[in-house]
Amino acid sequence: MHRALPLMLTTALLIPTAVSSQDSAGVQVKRGEYLVSIAGCHDCHTPWIIGSAGPEPDTKRALSGHPQDVTISAPATLSPPWSGAMNPTSTGWSGPWGVSFSANLTSDPETGVLRDFTEQQFIQTMRTGRHQGQGRPILPPMPWPAYGNMTDDDLKAVFAYLRQVPPVKNKVPDPLPPKQ
Amino acid sequence: MAQVSATAQRLKSGWSHRSAAVGAILAMSFVVLTGAPAIPQPATANPPSTLQETGLYADPVTLQVDSAHLAFAPQYPLWSDGATKRRWISLPPGTAIDGSDPEAWIFPVGTRFWKEFSFNGEKVETRYLERRADGQWLYAAYAWSDDGREAQLVSVRGRRGAYPLAGGRSHTIPGVTDCKACHQGGPSEILGFGTLQLSSERDAGAIHAELQPEPHVDLAHLVDRGLLVGLPKALRDAPPRIAAATATERAALGYLHGNCGHCHNERGSLQNIALFLRHRAETTGEPALASTVAQPVRKPAPGQSPDAVLRVEPGHPERSGLVQRVSSRSPALQMPPLGTELIDDEAVRLLYRWIEEKGASIQQAHANAEGR
């Protein structure tokens, strides 16, 4: 029995730490879920459908971006005073920049845009408006200038939540250039 | 048009909670059209409102540069759409740079750098870095007046349309956020003033090479005058140079070091991409070779050709992912992603030559092996 004491003591000391760590991660994810819900992320990153009470996000495809089977091949044709348009799923946006398609933010290992992002890169992306914080510019209407004002802790919480959103395999098409 | 009608119908149906998104599209349209992105970064102090106040000139009327400042030229300059550049460093009297870590020199508080950009003999902007007392670098850019007599501080958001370039494009004075995207992408915020860039053994094959201004500031010059201390003895004894099989390869890797290595390196936040284009002074072998030649393209960029399976495919520059990106100025595909509007044709030719030679050399090696 006396030989087991050190092990028991160690276990007793470690368990509260592990539980506390899990609690902390859970709190962070919940915080991220809350932020995603109030920051309008679903407005563009979850495809919209017509439900019984009108347009609503399709929660079965939550945060999976522009559906790969919804083809858009050219920017919208607009006349003044209009400068932009969106498609019925609210995932394709046309404007002076061309056409942008909302990204797949789910944890899908093949098609999720965040699959190669570190937490630091995600934060920098929101701060700089550039892919992985240093690369190509993120296209409108992604309101990164607003999200860039979030605290590091808030952005970490958003990232933690997005990393565990159920995967949806959906390869979002490349953006289209503006009309010449 | 059907999409527009659908949009109008939805908005008409009282989809009021989407107003934020609609507002965003309008606001971001404005951003795209006027070029006013970027979040103001917290500055450690406000930069002076004019370039003259930074202390670059001994005489602000004649624009005579203070002779106490050291002019320098890196051996592998950054391509900036053909801009002519002049650069200076100023160290506070009695101080020295700590070169103990050859990848990340530590500059004394009060160090100042200037880089002047001219097109067709016309000064357009001068960028300024100053190491403040809290250890942070202060970033600023100054735009020159049309008569070239004074330069005023540019907004932290930068300025588009600073000078017309070919093809209807124009030079952009970068905002502070974009400056930091490159300068904070690796082990040191100072990019053109380091161990390899100031090696006393300069690469005669480097493209866009600039004449070294007097007094030829290089490692030996700095060490001899006590301005650089702690540099490892091996680097003092043997000036660093890129380990390459040929002169073409040396120049190509040097170009990648100077134009890509500030983001693609082993110590920055993009290290998980495992694309290491920055030369390391104290290691044998070139990370740029190990991480590109016959290495797979991990995630194709939007618009990238599907035939780009490898980052560098020896013998096939046209389908090497690295070349495709350097050869593009499509915003989603181009590399570097900022700071340049025009393809660097000379660099593309150099990279083509390197990859073709690489293929030929591998073929020759195979032929030799079979003939044995």
Image (tube, grey):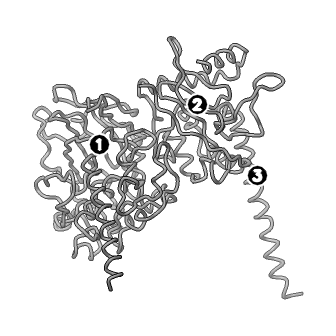
Does the residue at mark 2 contact the one at mark 1 (Cβ under 8 Å)?
A: no
Q: Quadrant for residue A76, please give it.
A: top right
Q: Amino acid at mark 1?
A: Tyr
Q: Are the residues under badges 2 and 3 in a single subunit?
A: yes
Q: Residue at x 26, y 72 (%)?
A: B235
Note whether residue B143 is visible: yes
Q: Residue at x 59, y 39 (%)?
A: A150
Label 3 to label 1: alpha-carbon separation: 45 Å
Q: Amino acid at mark 2?
A: Ile
Q: Could you tell whether B262 is left or right of A106 in the image?
A: left
Foreground of the two, B129 or B205: B205
Q: Which comes before the other along the chain, label 2 or label 3? A: 3
Label 2 to label 1: alpha-carbon separation: 45 Å
- Mark carried by residue B128: 1
Foreground of the two, B67 or B123: B123
Quadrant placement of the N terminus of chain B: top right
**Which residue matches tag 3?**
A26
Residue B53 higher or lower than A8, as above or below: above
Residue A176 higher or lower than A105, as above or below: above
Q: Amino acid at mark 3?
A: Gly
Given this view, does label 3 or label 1 mark the residue nearer the observer?
A: 3
Query: How many labels sit on residues?
Result: 3
Foreground of the two, B228 or B348: B348
Residue B294 picture location, percent across and down: 43, 65
At numbered mark 2, what does the secondary structure look like: helix, strand or loop? loop
**Which residue matches tag 2?**
A72
* Chain where mark 3 sits: A
Residue B30 picture location, percent across and down: 47, 22
Residue A40 picture location, percent across and down: 67, 31
* Chain where mark 2 sits: A
Note whether residue A28 is visible: no
Quadrant placement of the C terminus of chain B: bottom left
